[in-house]
Amino acid sequence: MTQGTSVPIVGQVLNDRYEVIEKIGEGGMAIAYRGRDRVLGRVVAIKVMRPELASDAAFLSRFRREARAAAGVTHEHIAGVYDTGSDGPFHYIVMEYVEGESLKDRLRREGTLPLAEALRIAAETAEALEAAHAAGVIHRDIKPHNILLGREGQVKVSDFGIARAASAAGQSDTTAIVGSVQYISPEQARGDAVGPQGDLYSLGATLFEILTGRTPFDGADKLAILHRHIYDRPPRVSELRPGIPAEVDSVVAHCLEKDLSRRFASARELLSYLGACPSTEEAGDAAWPWARGRQLAFALSGTGRWIRRRGLWLALGVVLVAGVVVGLTLWSGARGRATMVRVPDLEGMRSARARDLAAELGLEYREVGSRPSENVTAGCVLSQVPTANVEAQPETVIKVVLSVGPSHVVVPEVTRMSVTQAHRNLEAAGLTGGTVREAYDESVPKDYVTSTLPAAGARVVRDTAVDLVVSLGPELSTPLGSVLSTRTEPGEGREYTLNFAAPGDEEAEGEREVVIEIVDERGSRRIYEGRHRPGERIPPQKITVVSATTARILVDGKVQARRQYLP
């Protein structure tokens, strides 16, 4: 099993931390593996970028930024992003592993789902989108494949940010950029900017498939489907599944509107409509009292004929009985409405106060996630579902998202600190430790931090991983030199000629095994090996540098000197 290269990945441990156990799936941009985080001892999902994307430096940079932004949003219905990194040819992200299956797998097995479950899945996905959109993160590839269902059926939306990163990679194949065209919004199909409403269109297309077993549009090829998303009106869900309530029909249709002004404006607005949808397909008196009124009118329409036959007093008795029935029904409905509770406005309240207020009104309070906010104090309610002032049944669950404070933090100054102390300071500032690499430094003592990336003082998203450069101390005084010649062909890097002598104590007797290794973004490789006495000149070695490169000299297997070269 490979990642499209000759280098196998299953069985490897990426960056001495993430053990790759088995392949569990693949998409247009990444291959997914089940893995294990050896540091924290937990099972994780590892998504390794495909080589054609991983070789694009612009894509990798964009992808890491998007992954870090997605990692700043926590919600019970979003699969968490834990880490992102590179190890040789492998560029990966580490995510929460969800025990269960994708919604697509479920639909392949069952075709369609019951209405109540379909509405729940749509609502939980909309809750995830509401949290992400509020943090400025757009998914751009909502589809059943990216909606994961846990063992208990709970929704976990995955792959935030991947589609946006890929869209910057200059791919010519539309599906490689944005995923499955069956769920793409009209604006995305046209190549226009995509906002939160694009995700709502894709969720509408997904709900359409959950209810009908097919996508809104099909066609002979991908371009035909894109054309239909832009110009054609999809069929009504009730045309394919009779018995679907009119409210559900309307919600799906509004999600799939071409005109943004007619589509739901936000995930929160969509949630309010989903909450009002009937969850059963059984024909009944959902339209009461109008349905009852029509039945009563129909029954009384024959009263004139009956009067002529039976007499006025009997007719009046029938009307009186009918009035009593209607009165009792209205009184029963009024009693039912009297038990309803008006949902309080919890936004801006401290979580403890919000919990107490909900309990006082007979409602349940549940915190489902957190996200940054520039305006709401950390620990206070940022948003709620259901929204304030709507009527709800007693014991209704109010799902709230808490604020974690401002979305950006400042990278602290951690130079001349040990790695352990630097990590503590980063965590105290709301950041995490990233990769650690070593470099020679004349001014900073060995094993202390010389610099960070991002640099101190930079404003970054909370939980951003900050990479550290640690001092190796002064570079060894080994007779290692170089003759530089810049290549004339653009984009081919620079050519260096290495001239050096075998390091070591020149008074020592005997030859030593000398190896020269080159380490760059492609990994490490030997360019020379032989046996020499200390101080003996070694044949010049030429290297072409296209990225930051380190030459290492090993004597009897131990590194004796290093020198860095830039393209």
Image (tube, grey):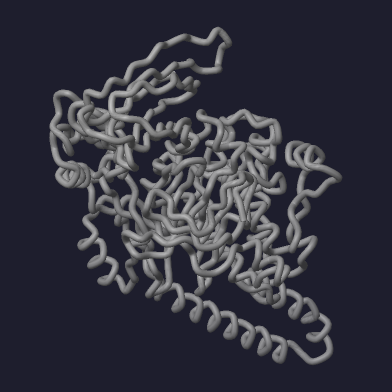
Residue 63 screen position, x and y as percent: 48, 37
The residue lying furthest to the front in this view is: 509
Most foreground residue, 163 or 504: 504
Q: Is residue 276 visible?
A: no
The part of the image, by quadrant, that contains residue 405 is top left
Most foreground residue, 95 or 358: 95
Residue depicted at x 63% and y 46%: 4
199 with respect to 484 (left or right): right
The C terminus: image quadrant:
top left
The part of the image, by quadrant, that contains residue 118 is bottom right
* Vertical placement of residue 54 versus 495, above or below: below
467 with respect to 75 (left or right): left
208 with respect to 231 (left or right): left
Most foreground residue, 439 or 456: 439
Q: Is residue 393 visible?
A: yes
* Vertical placement of residue 11 versus 501, above or below: below
Residue 217 screen position, x and y as percent: 77, 49
Residue 447 screen position, x and y as percent: 18, 39
Residue depicted at x 56% and y 33%: 55
The N terminus: image quadrant:
bottom right
Residue depicted at x 67% and y 63%: 210
